[in-house]
Amino acid sequence: MTRAWAWCRAWLSSLLLTVSLAAGCADYTEVDDLYVMTGLGVDVADDGRLRVTADIINPDASQSQQTVGTGGGSQTPDLVVQTEADSLEMAIDDVQRRLPHRVYLSHNAVVVLGEGIVQRQLQSLMDELERNRSIRRSELLIMTKDRAADVLSARVAASVSSALRLQDVVEQAADWSPVLRSDQLHVMRRWLSPSGTSAMIWIDRNGQGEPIVRGLALVTREGRTLWVDAKEWRGMLWWLSSTRGLLDSVACPKPHGTRIFGGGRAREAAGHQGEDGLTRLDETVLVHWLSTRTRVRWAGTAQRPRFWVEWRGEGEVERGCASMRLDTDAYSRLEAAAASLVRTEMQAALQRARRAGVDAMGLQNALYQADAKAYQALAAHPDWWQTAPVHYDIRARLVRSYMVTHSPFGEYARESQKKSLGTGGLSR
Amino acid sequence: MRRRQGPTPVPQQAERAAAELERRLMPCPDLRQQSLVVAGRTAVIVWLEGLVDEQRLQIGLGAFAAGGREAAQPGWWERLGLGQGRATAESRRGPAPGGRSPLLPMRSVRHMEAAVEAVLAGNAVAFLDGEPFATAWDVEKSPGRTIERAENEPTLQGPQEAFTENLGGNLALLRKRLKTPGFKAEPWEFGERSRTQAALLYIEGMTKPELLDTVRRRLEYVHVDAVVDLNVVREYINDAPFSPFPTTEETERPERVVSSLLQGRVGLLIDGSPNCVMVPVTLPMLLNSPEDYYMRFALALPLRLMRHLMFWSAMLLPSLYVALLTYNQDLMPTPLLVSVAAQHTGIPFPTVIEALAMMVAFETLREAGTRLPRAVGQSVSIVGTLIIGDAAVRAGLVSPGMVIVVAATGVASFTLPALGLVQVTRLLQFLFVGVAALMGLYGVMLLAVATVGHLVSIRSFGIPYMSPLAPTVWSDMKDTVVRAPWWAMRQRPRQFEPLDSRRAKGRPGQRQKRWWAR
């Protein structure tokens, strides 16, 4: 009996081990049985349903690229499949029905959202994206004013799929500011914050059909959208996050004692236009902001809401004024002018956001994090943040590097200094 | 019941005694006899051709022939053989009579069984009429190699000598490097039929006595017919006999044995084997190469790190590749997935079959390269790797990625200095691939955890196999992954608990400091 029981136990253990090991086989999928989806485009169809465009890697094209001399280079690197359905899941199921292999969602890199979807079905779409376990939360969410299908199927490079090309474009833009890398995780996190506003990168096609970064799209939970063009996004980027490598044109500051006519700081800030209306490059200093950081702090009470914005930036002069000597005094005036310009840009961005009813700056977040009770007290007046005063503490620092102070103009300046010394002596 | 027979006394007739010895050994075509007449009596000398040094044999024969008048005196024969033990004539009796070499060790043999053993051990045995015992003198000169370069553990720098199959020569190689009376070579004999001589090596006053007792106790359990190689004894004495991981260390380099003995470890040399077993051993020690000690200490760190990495790579690389391609495609970067998928398109086999086939092919080529003569073996390896691999890829039987992974695994295993570890990786990589095919990365992780658990649970002669990493012995870290400069390693490894823990004490009253520390 004992011996029989021992045999029985051994067999049972072997069986259990085999079953437990083999249980994983259900997930066994050969890599060549997969259709790797790298991009999704979502538009609104005429009948109000979702028009979903899937960008799928074409394995035959990839294989022919690796095989020398097969002449398979004419194949497109990706397959673009379009369908219409009531939901994203149903659309993906429909795409799956049309393809011979399993559609693999885990490598989806971008989701392009058309303008219409933001106004009508964004909440349900985001909900679906969040719930789908096959989709990574690191995928990039891209807004477009064109049709998402057009952006996703823009054929630019013969060897790279459109979605991966879009991913590269976004990654490149994210060097300026992390907010431009609008991945699903962070977009959702901002969307669910008290401010309820997410920033997403805005990409359209240019005249040649290539995808280019147009600017920023600020989307609220309610479906309001503020499109900020790249030409004027600096002020918004100062507000949204730290930045790196942004360029700014600052009007050449006048020496002490020189009176500025017609507009004071505003004119100095925007003073790179001559009287003829044309841009005068020789009257501006090009500042390259190496890094900036912004902090928004709540500094008021529930009765008197008030915010304090702290901006710190470090930059260097990329191009100076031709007639300007970059001495200590000039640097101080240049830093003041740069700070003034940043302040003006931030104020303009704030005004624009307030007009659009989009709390892109996260003023409500700052209040909630600092004083949740005050936030609850102000909840009865949802528009309080549009009128709350904001105080700015802006400090710009320009790096005095050898390359800057000894520019080719420096040699010229020294020569002219020698001449002036020879004729009139040292004027200091 | 069979009655046990006692030893047979040596017959007093020399011819009869020689015939009896021949009867016991026959058929034995290499047995040689020489009859002499010494002081009117017949003497027969017997030896085995090929086992003896003919020059020394002639000296012995000359000693009999020159016996002359002295040989007729009573007791001469007994005095010649000294009657007992091994000793030289010089040491016991002063100058030898009749021109006999003073350095020729002679001894008396009273039984035929001992006479046979003496002949088999390379002695010449002489029988003399009227004498109830024989005289044996050691003229052994076993055929064997001369000292050659270490081929299995090559280094660019440092000593190049290697052990041979001769125990006496191997001991001499050690004594040359270790001129201390504390160095002991305890004689042992294994094999009821082979009577293989062995030497247990240690340094008295340094090696922990408990360790020595453990080794001796285990050696006493070696009951075997013949010991033809060190591995026979090793399998008898090692810990965790069913573990694939080696719990003893082998080397063919004398200076490594000396280093080990100076750490407080124990060595075992066996006649007929060109290797020495050293115990105890730990896994980090098996990943150290002798070269680490012959180069600048700073360079040893990256090389040792690389070996640790390669050890795990040699076990895990194919299984990780299989798991990533069949279960966990989401963990690969998208461009890599696209590339791998394109490579695999059109391959007729599942990934796991492809991997196993390539691994078996690689092992076959490696085995062929080992078994064949060296020149041919190298050709087979190159032909197999380059031509067959390329042809298989062109034929669409395997993907290029799989060839790269299997080849990289093989190369990774070649970086391991201990042959025992290489064999472990060869074995375990198949197990890991099997688990990867069943459960993906999850299974690989489970088996890896089990492997690490096994590694930390086994011991080598009482020392945890993963020490000084687990359990952590911080002072021994100086020679684990990093190799501290020699002047910083003042203490011997604590894990072996040597009786004398300091490597050098310096002169009495002199402080140990560096020349720059003034």
Image (spheres, coloured by chain):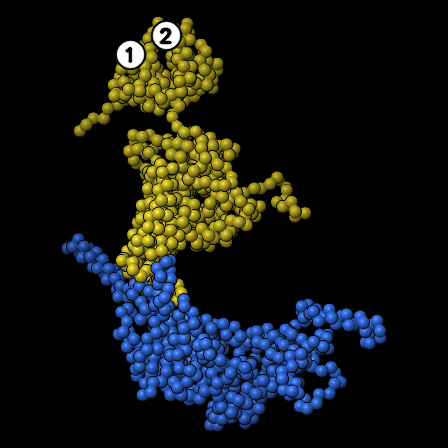
Instruction: Please state which of residues B499 and A131 is positioned toward the viewer in this rendering.
Output: A131
Q: In which quadrant of the rendered image does the C terminus of chain A lie?
A: bottom right
Whether B59 is drawn above or below B225: the answer is: above
- Classify residue A128 by image quadrant: bottom left
Compared with residue B293, is residue A328 higher up or lower down, i.e. above or below? Answer: below
Q: State the yellow chain.
A: B
Mark sitting on residue B15:
1
Task: Name the residue type under label 2.
Answer: Val
Which quadrant is home to the N terminus of chain A? bottom left
Image-quadrant location for residue A205: bottom left
The kind of residue tagged 1 is Glu
- Please indicate whether residue A233 sits to the left or right of residue B445 in the image: right
Q: How many marks?
A: 2
Q: Where's residue A126, x and y in %?
A: 38, 81
Question: Which residue is depicted at the point 30% across and 33% down?
Answer: B226
Q: Indicate the position of residue B457 as horizontal and vertical percent values.
A: 37, 53
B235 in relation to A259, above or below: above
Work out whether disc 1 and disc 2 sit on a shared chain: yes
In the displayed structure, does residue A80 sit left or right of residue A365? left
Q: Is residue A119 visible?
A: yes
N-terminal-most mark, 1 or 2: 1
Which chain identifier belongs to the blue chain?
A
**Which residue, given by chain and number where applicable, does mark 2 sit on?**
B38
Q: Position of residue B160 (x, y in %)?
A: 48, 36
- Mark 1 and mark 2 in contact? Answer it, CB < 8 Å: no
Name which residue lies at 19% across and 27% down: B2
Q: CA distance from mark 1 to mark 2?
A: 14 Å
Q: Secondary structure at mark 1?
A: helix
Q: Chain of mark 2?
A: B
